[in-house]
Image (cartoon, rainbow, N blue to C red):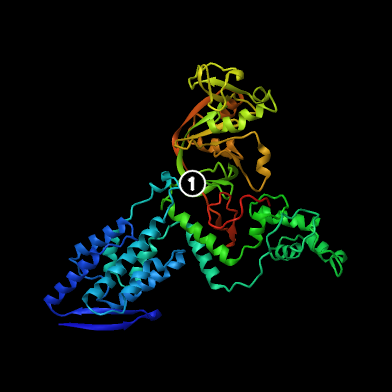
């Protein structure tokens, strides 16, 4: 004999609980659960389906949820709250909603399995995220700690509502920025966004031009707090009063726009084009989307980073060294161009090369270096480039007249372009070798002026450092035979030398376009690589 109890749960969802009173009834329920588990759900990853099947098999197909209406309702609420993590709760609740409200063993079994599958999928997404192999390198994701889904589900089956909430909270990334971004998302969801008309698209606005869109740009810049005291006075001056030309893009507005661009790490050229216009039009809905994207990227990281590590944030153009769990050094960096992106990845610094040679990548040599000879035949001699036959240390030099540029070959075989050490060398005085398949490394640069710019994506993929000698001194600080004085003297000789690190330093190359700063303010940066859907037009200036 079976008794059916209907429970009206919060949010209008009706859950039906089955109370079993006889052995034959238990057998019927187990059979129904087994049938529900066997029904394929191709929308779920195989690891989720397998964990759910293992969980019910270990319980001899006894239900996890429907025999306790309170726990079932608590789980439904947890799945609905997946939105607080920037996840789509519908992905976990659709099957639950479809199975709710029906009667009979089969329907109850489908509901129980739907709840379990929803929890398993939510747990997996919260733990690992959903990294796109086209965006993030496996060197980062393969180091992620494994989540035993079946074990998690077994523990959840024994938990009351409060304990279940704690278990789900334990799946969230432990990184401090994740909790801060989650709180920022909650604030964005709580506030009512004012209806603000977007500034219309159009030709790039340049200083000195007149355009009706200048008026709303003034208002938006003022709302962003970019006017200095000096500009506030200018803004209120008689020339801007009644009859003043508010539609003229004047010098004061140009300075304020440049300040706004620097704050968002845009190219601070004072032009209002695709990127700057997108930033000016950014509303809370756009900020919410960006926060969600960055919470997802934090889920890709290993849950526990090494106590000593280096993080390079491409979107922030900065490098941070953490030692013994505390940040000890930060500096500016230059990262890859949009068409030569620095990859999201992890690697280890293995050694330093002092006064390095630079072997130009084939694509760069073919597309960038050789074409410059057309307008400047002495370019290679000026920059210290040599064309060599092959990759051996004793490779002979090849005359430029003998090089087949499209094929990078010569009568002596394939060729490479190598730059000698010196003040013009593209790698500067120090190269920090990292083991990875992308040939990415950190290095010095002779182009020091680039660090004065707010947007610093000018490299061919490798990371140029603002203060490379300081970083080298820190990495060698545990090697008494390499004090700063010896490092400086070795650099001054001009001789190429490799210094092995006794301790490898892990480097994480990440792409965080949003974070919460120490003052609690949400910081949003430009999506320089266009990894967000519907981002700013890459073809426009400003």
Residue occupying image coordinates x 66% and y 69%: 197
Q: Is residue 165 visible?
A: no
Q: Foreground residue, 310 or 528?
A: 528
Residue 364 lies, in percent from the top left, at 57, 33
| Left or right of 483, for residue 244 | right
**Whether residue 304 is situated above or below residue 359 in the rendered picture:** below
Please give the residue where the numbered disc 1 appears in the rendered image.
344
Give above or below for 381 relative to 96: above
Which quarter of the figure has residue 170? bottom left
Residue 75: % across, % down: 34, 71
Residue shown at 43% from the left, 57% from the top: 174
Label 1 environment density (alpha carbons within 10 Å; few <14, some 14–19, many ≥20)? many
Total numbered badges shown on the rendered structure:
1
In front of the other: 539 or 397: 539
- Residue 291 located left or right of residue 22: right
In which quadrant is the N terminus drawn?
A: bottom left
* Residue at figure coordinates x 81%, y 57% from the top left: 250
Asked whether the viewer can see residue 82, the reply is: yes
- Residue 332 image offset from top left, x and y in percent: 61, 44
Secondary structure of the residue carrying tag 1 is loop
Reply above or below: 58 against 21: above
Q: Is residue 341 left or right of residue 424?
A: left
Residue 80: image location, x then y, percent: 41, 71
The residue lying at 23 percent from left, 83 percent from top is 4
Residues 274 and 521: in front is 274
């Amino acid at each position: 004999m079976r008794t059916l109890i209907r429970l009206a749960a919060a949010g209008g969802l009706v859950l039906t609980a089955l109370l079993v009173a006889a052995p034959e009834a238990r057998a019927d329920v187990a059979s129904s659960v087994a049938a529900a588990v066997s029904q394929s759900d191709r929308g779920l990853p195989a690891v989720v389906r397998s964990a759910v099947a293992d969980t019910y098999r270990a319980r001899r197909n006894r239900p996890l949820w429907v025999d306790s209406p309170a726990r079932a309702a608590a789980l439904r609420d947890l799945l609905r709250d997946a939105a607080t993590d920037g996840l789509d709760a519908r992905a976990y609740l659709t099957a639950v909603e479809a199975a709710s409200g029906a009667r009979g063993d089969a329907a109850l079994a489908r509901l129980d399995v739907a709840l379990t599958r929803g929890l398993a999928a939510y747990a997996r997404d919260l733990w690992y995220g959903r990294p796109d192999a086209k965006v993030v390198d496996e060197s980062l994701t393969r180091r992620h700690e494994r989540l035993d889904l079946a074990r998690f589900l077994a523990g959840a089956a024994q938990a009351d509502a409060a304990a279940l909430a704690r278990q789900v909270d334990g799946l969230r990334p432990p990184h401090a920025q994740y909790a801060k971004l989650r709180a920022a998302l909650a604030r964005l969801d709580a506030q009512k966004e004012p209806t603000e008309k977007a500034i219309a698209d159009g030709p790039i606005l340049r200083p000195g031009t007149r355009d009706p869109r200048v008026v709303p740009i003034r208002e938006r810049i003022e709302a962003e707090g970019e006017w200095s005291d000096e500009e506030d006075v200018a803004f209120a001056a008689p020339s801007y009063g009644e009859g003043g030309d508010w539609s003229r893009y004047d010098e004061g507005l140009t300075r304020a726009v440049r300040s706004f661009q620097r704050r968002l790490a845009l190219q601070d050229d004072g032009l209002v084009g695709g990127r700057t216009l997108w930033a000016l039009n950014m509303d809370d809905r756009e900020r919410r989307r960006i926060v969600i994207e960055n919470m997802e990227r934090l889920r890709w990281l290993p849950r526990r980073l090494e106590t000593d590590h280096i993080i390079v944030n491409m979107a922030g153009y900065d490098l941070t060294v953490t030692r013994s769990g505390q940040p000890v050094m930060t500096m500016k960096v230059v990262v890859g161009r949009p068409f030569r992106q620095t990859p999201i990845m992890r690697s280890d610094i293995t050694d330093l090369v002092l006064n390095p040679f630079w072997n130009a990548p084939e694509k760069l040599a073919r597309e960038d270096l050789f074409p410059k000879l057309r307008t400047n035949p002495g370019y290679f001699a000026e920059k210290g480039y040599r064309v060599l036959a092959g990759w051996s240390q004793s490779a002979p030099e090849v005359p430029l007249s003998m090089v087949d540029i499209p094929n990078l070959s010569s009568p002596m075989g394939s060729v490479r372009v190598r730059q000698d050490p010196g003040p013009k060398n593209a790698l500067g005085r120090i190269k920090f070798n990292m083991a990875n398949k992308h040939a990415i490394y950190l290095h010095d640069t002779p182009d020091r002026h680039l660090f004065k710019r707010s947007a610093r994506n000018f490299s061919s993929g490798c990371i140029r450092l603002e203060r490379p000698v300081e970083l080298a001194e820190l990495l060698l600080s545990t090697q008494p035979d390499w004090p700063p004085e010896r490092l400086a003297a070795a650099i001054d000789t001009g001789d190429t030398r490799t210094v092995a690190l006794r301790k490898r330093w892990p480097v994480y190359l990440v792409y965080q376009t949003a974070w919460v700063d120490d003052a609690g303010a949400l910081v949003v940066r430009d999506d320089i690589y266009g990894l967000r859907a519907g981002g700013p037009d890459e073809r426009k200036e400003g």
